[in-house]
Image: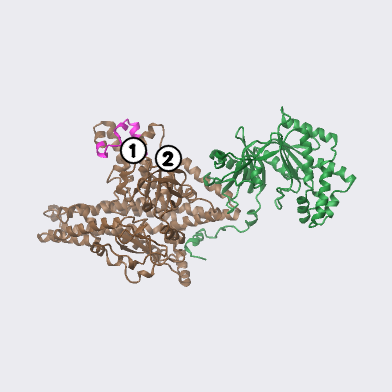
Amino acid sequence: MLNHRHISWFADIGLQDRPRVGGKGGSLGELQRGGLPVPPGFVVTTSAFEQCLDALERAASVRTTVAAVDAYDLPAIQAISGTLRTRVTQAELPPELIEEITAAHAMLCGDDPTQPVALRSSATTEDASDASFAGLQDTYLWVRGVDETIRMIRSCWASLYSVESISYRRQRHFPEQNVAMAVVVQRMVDARSAGVMFTRSPVTGDRSVITIEGSWGLGSAVVGGEVTPDRWVIGKITGEISTRDISDKAIAHQPRPAGGIESVAVVEEQRRKPCMNDTELQSLREIARKVERHYGRAQDIEWAVDRARGEIFLLQSRPETVWSARDATPVARAADNPSLHVMSIFGGRT
Amino acid sequence: MNDIDGTGRAADFARGFPLPSSLRTLAGTEAAQAAYPYYMQFGPGDDERFWFYNSMHFPEPMCAFDMVTAEAAYCALGAANTRVHCLPTTLGIDYRIINGRVYIGGNAVTDPTEIARRTVEFQKRAFYYYENWERLYAQWREKMLRLIGDAQSLARPMLPEFEPLANVHAGRGIASNHDLIDIYNKALEGYFRMWHHHFEFLLLGYGAYLTFFAFCKKAFPEISDQTVSRMVAGIDAEIFRPDDELRRLARCAVEMGVDAHFQEERTPEAIMTSLRAAGKQGELWLKELQTSRDPWFNINVGDGFYHYHRSWNDDLTMPFAGIPGYIARVKAGETLTRPVERLRAERQQLVADYRELLGSDEERAAYDQMISLALRVFPYVEGHKFYCEHWYTNLFFNKIREFGALLAANAFFAHESDVFQLTHYELQSAIIDLMTSWSTGSPPRGPARWPKIIAERRAALAEWAKHETPPALGPVPDIIDDPAIVMLWGITRESLNAWLKSGTDPDSNEIRGFAASNGVVEGPACVIRSVEEIGRLRQGDILVCQITNPTWAPIFQKIAGAVSDIGGSMSHAAIVAREFDLPAVVGTGNATSRIKNGQRLRVDGGRGVVTILD
């Protein structure tokens, strides 16, 4: 694939490229590199953002203004946010950048230039293992055509200056100089079903089970908590499905023909049907194991099943943080005499 | 629902279990109850202790002779725990019988000083066993085979009219009537000895396995019991052999071209007669049958604790019932051989996969130690039953049956099986009566005494079988941590709570137990309370029983699912169910009393839930 100054294709990047492609971009590249099914796409790297920001900084300061604001002065943050978002979304892009994006977009969409794509903000501070930025930056789904794509790239950049993002960074004292935004542009999966899965039980921390949650339509309904998803617990090694909670799934997120997505009511006969069959669940299990092996630690994964062909795609994977933090004490240690272990059964309560 | 006093009134355990003293011998059965030895009767002081009904080992009322099993087993179990291995926190198991039902109670050690003293002893003894397991277990097998050989060599008891001339000329110096008491005492002594062998390794074996089990449950809180047992289960354990032999015989029948002789409705005798008439190929198959029978058909259709749990060798109905189904599968192209290498590789992979998931190398080191100990002990845990409960008990009960035939021939009673209505003390007295009569030339006194008593006891057994008995008696302890009780019976404070609760909620259509074998199935219930009812099972039925037994394997190909009152992670029923890929829920506590014959059930073996659909 062609590599330009400001464009990197998934195949060419990995986690180590996070300063350039952001957390989400690095993770998607890493997944593809690991042989996992990721919808094809590229990243508009932080250099494009920096170039645009430089132009803006020449007109009036951006980073120093943000760095100076009080983390808990909400009116001040609101004022700064409003101004900066407008400036970013209205910024003129250099012609060579537009050219690069247009070429990459054409390559991604192939014969059909209106092929829907997803745009995901990929901040350099995002998805760090110690702080989750999840949900703070914008994602735009079902974007059609290159013009709209370019417009949404600026919207993604601008989301770095949303009230929530600024407050979050200020409260955690992230150095503003290091904060930059890449944007993932990815072929959109028209999801029949989608959801999340955890390679470790969120309830007990058990590493031998995978918890899968899913619902009809696009995964944004599950991630955004707008629907109670179906839930399965499946043995990572055995494949035994020990829990099947099939819920009443009243709504689904679907693409709107004109672009973007909408929330629609699920037809009565589909509401209480499981959104995944056992074969698909087993495929998810295989994928989850592969992702976890690739990273060497437990993961939270977003997945989707393509409506037309039933293929499974991964949209995101990040390290599990809650239980990993509690792993300090081992369940048991080796004993000088292995027989001593039986005292846990024969020795009575200790 | 428990009808404890014969009035048909349902008992409610919401406020606890009844006291032993409140339990009455059913009207009209007092004499039969009094026949059991004094040390098995409930008495003063027993109300202060907690007892539970051992329906796992003694699911049906025990006739007078069969109580020797409880007697010999608890003598040996207690000796191992209390005096031989010196388990730190428990002594032996006490037992009592009422209305033919065996109740047992643990004997916990709670004084910390005493526990500490016993711990020192325990480690000197038990650890020696763990460290020398293979050698001691090899020695155990030799001992056990020798004991079996001794039992096989005991002569059939009989009384000639005159002492054989050869004995007289040889100057033998003792007469044939003395042989009766000699054979009887040796048979009885062998049975008590066998139970000592049985418990030589048992608790230590279960303990080592449960150590690994508990570790897995901590490291993987959601791991299923069955997955843990799959990690250590033997691939070619003795317990699989009888069924493997049936598969082999089915293959032989097809290969030899004699499979047409096996038809579902035919009796084993009819099949064998027609094979004999079929010429050389038929004879060849019968020779193969003979190879399988010795020793692998020395397996009882029950747990071997009752005299009427006959072996496949005694009654070929059970094994022959399985052969036509296997023949059909062979003809459909299946080889029916156990893929031993593949299963072994799968087990290794399973162990390695879970190892990989552990959180640290520290945990992996502990895991390695525990699983190697569990793998070391497991051949005994799985294997001992074939030698002890099956092969040996069968020889023993058949020897007693020979005494029954001799006594019946001398008009002590009508049928050889009547002998089992006598306690082993009474049987000894009857034998001495016969010996005396042979020597004096006067008629024996027994024929005037025993028939009436036997009729009375048979009637009592029938009456007792009609009534449920409470699952437990006496005050419920706060905590049950007696390792013997937890290990062998799976009884914990939680399971008692479930019993207490189920007494109060008979209307729920859900019954919960251990998830023993994955899968969901629906079908009609066939409630089997005694092994003699097995013939009622139809293709596609869901077997509902008190305890399933691995020797029921041939009928597992008939049923669609299995539900049992008793059983847990150590249950062989679970292993066989998985072998046959059947959904199974075990350890429900009361499925046989809550489910009616013919009701439609849904068995969810993955969740451990049985739903009554009707």
Up/down of B251 relative to B127, above or below? above
Q: Chain A appears what colour?
A: green
Return the residue nearer the eye: B511 or B459. B511
Up/down of A296 relative to A257, above or below? below
Q: Which residues are magenta?
A: B246-270
- Most extreme residue toward the top, as rendered? A111
Q: Which residue is mark 2?
A: B338
Q: Quadrant of the N terminus of chain B?
A: bottom left
Q: Are marks 2 and 1 on the same chain?
A: yes
Q: Which chain is brown?
A: B
Q: Chain of mark 2?
A: B
**What colour scheme governs how the chains and residues are painted in the rendered image of this protein?**
by chain
Three-letter residue code for mark 1? Ile
Return the residue nearer the eye: B451 or A102. A102
Query: Percent position (x, y) of residue B186?
Result: 26, 58
Q: Which residue is mark 1?
A: B323
- Whether residue B368 sits left or right of residue B597 in the image: it is right
Three-letter residue code for mark 2? Arg
The residue that appears at 34% across and 32% down in the rendered structure is B254
Which element carries disc 1, helix, strand or loop?
Answer: helix
